[in-house]
Image: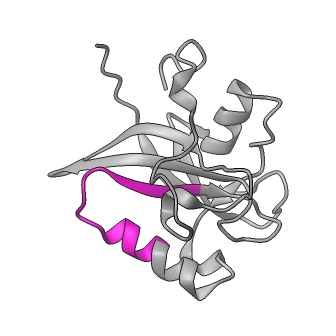
Amino acid sequence: MIIVFNHIKVEKHKSQYIQDEHYTIIIDGMALDVRLHDLYPNDHYLGLIPAMIDWLSFEEEKRLVHSRYRSTRNPEILPLLMCPDDCDLYCTLIVAEVITKDEEINWNKIGLDIDICGTCRSLGLQKGSGVPKRYLQDEPKKLKGM
């Protein structure tokens, strides 16, 4: 098994659809939405924005995201990126399966949280399997080094 360490930080940047600077997830110097777009150019990930509590439209979703980021459960499914059109968790949603240990945060898997109805089942807002339907790492050639 190959272990890859990436540098993850949050910086203020503009994005594809939001011209005001906003917090952006940066991995190894590249915005996460841009990196995903480079890997999956037909999947419309460019312009997704961080799933920040201040931007979410619904109180239930704000509480859910807040509880996930404060959770001590391992692993935990955390929402990372969402569609900027509606600013909710029911459209395109990129999530990570995260394991924390001491000062280390590991994104075991990154996935697209989808189902036929477009509900966010892995986040528990609807009954479901508890995991995203498609993990992006299931395509290992594309994510080599991420």
Q: Position of residue 55 (x, y in %)?
A: 65, 76
| Residue plotted at (58% across, 42% down) | 133
| Residue plotted at (14% across, 52% down) | 102
Question: Which residue is nearer to you in this view: 54 or 86?
Answer: 86
User: From what the image shows, is residue 139 above or below residue 122?
Assistant: above
Question: Which residue is nearer to you in this view: 122 or 100?
Answer: 122
Name the image colouring. one colour
Q: Position of residue 122 (x, y in %)?
A: 50, 56
User: From what the image shows, is residue 141 above or below residue 101?
Assistant: above
Question: Which residue is nearer to you in this view: 143 or 126?
Answer: 126
| Residue plotted at (67% across, 62% down) | 119
Q: Is residue 116 magenta?
A: no
User: From what the image shows, is residue 134 above or below residue 100?
Assistant: above
The quarter in which the N terminus is drawn is: top left
The reply, left or right, for residue 15 in relation to residue 74 is right
Q: Position of residue 144 (x, y in %)?
A: 51, 16
Q: Quadrant of residue 21?
A: bottom right
| Residue plotted at (73% across, 51% down) | 116
Question: Which residue is nearer to you in this view: 53 or 117?
Answer: 117
Q: Position of residue 76 (x, y in %)?
A: 35, 55
The reply, left or right, for residue 142 in relation to residue 103 is right
For this orientation, the residue located farthest to the bottom is: 59
The magenta-colored residue range is: 65-80
The number of numbered badges drawn on the structure is 0
Q: Is residue 70 magenta?
A: yes
